[in-house]
Image (cartoon, rainbow, N blue to C red):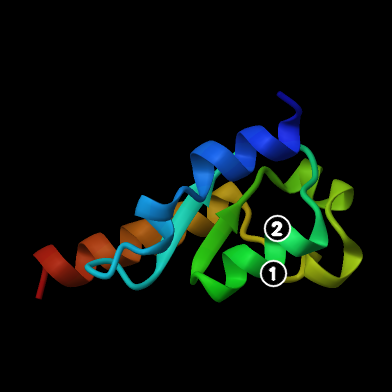
Amino acid sequence: MDNENVCKNFSISSSVLKGERVPNKHLLTLQQGVSENLLEEMENARLQLVVPEPYHKQYPEVYRDKLWSVSKFIDYANEKFYRIYHI
């Protein structure tokens, strides 16, 4: 099975894409590059792709500014946690 199918089959399975209880989802991957079609599908499903910053250059240029780095995701998670537990 090639990388594209691995990502598509396991990472954005129908259970993830249709998860109504979690409207905004995040997927951390070490996959180096994904097709524009798959990135568009993820975007439509409100699935934020989190990729180590050195890998960003291996993604289609039109989507690079939409990718999150791991550090951006950690900052987001820390902020969410703080808002929930330190109100």
Instruction: From the top left corner, tell me how far across and down residue 67 is, in percent.
Output: 67, 62
The quarter of the picture where residue 41 lies is: bottom right
User: In this rendering, is residue 14 above or below 30?
Assistant: below
Label 1: which residue? 40
> What number is the disc on residue 38?
2
Residue type at mark 2: give it. Answer: Leu
Give the spatial CA distance, label 1 vs label 2.
5 Å
Nearer to the camera, 83 or 26: 26
Nearer to the camera, 29 or 41: 41
In this picture, residue 34 sits left or right of residue 5: right
The quarter of the picture where residue 72 lies is: bottom right
Check disc 2 and report its element: helix, strand or loop.
Answer: helix
Q: Is any atom of residue 69 visible in this view?
A: yes
- Residue at 80%, 45% in the rendered image: 33
Instruction: From the top left corner, tell me how far across and down residue 58 is, in percent.
Output: 87, 47
In this picture, residue 48 sits left or right of residue 37: left
Mark 2 crowdedness (10 Å alpha carbons): few <14, some 14-19, many ≥20? some
Nearer to the camera, 58 or 2: 2
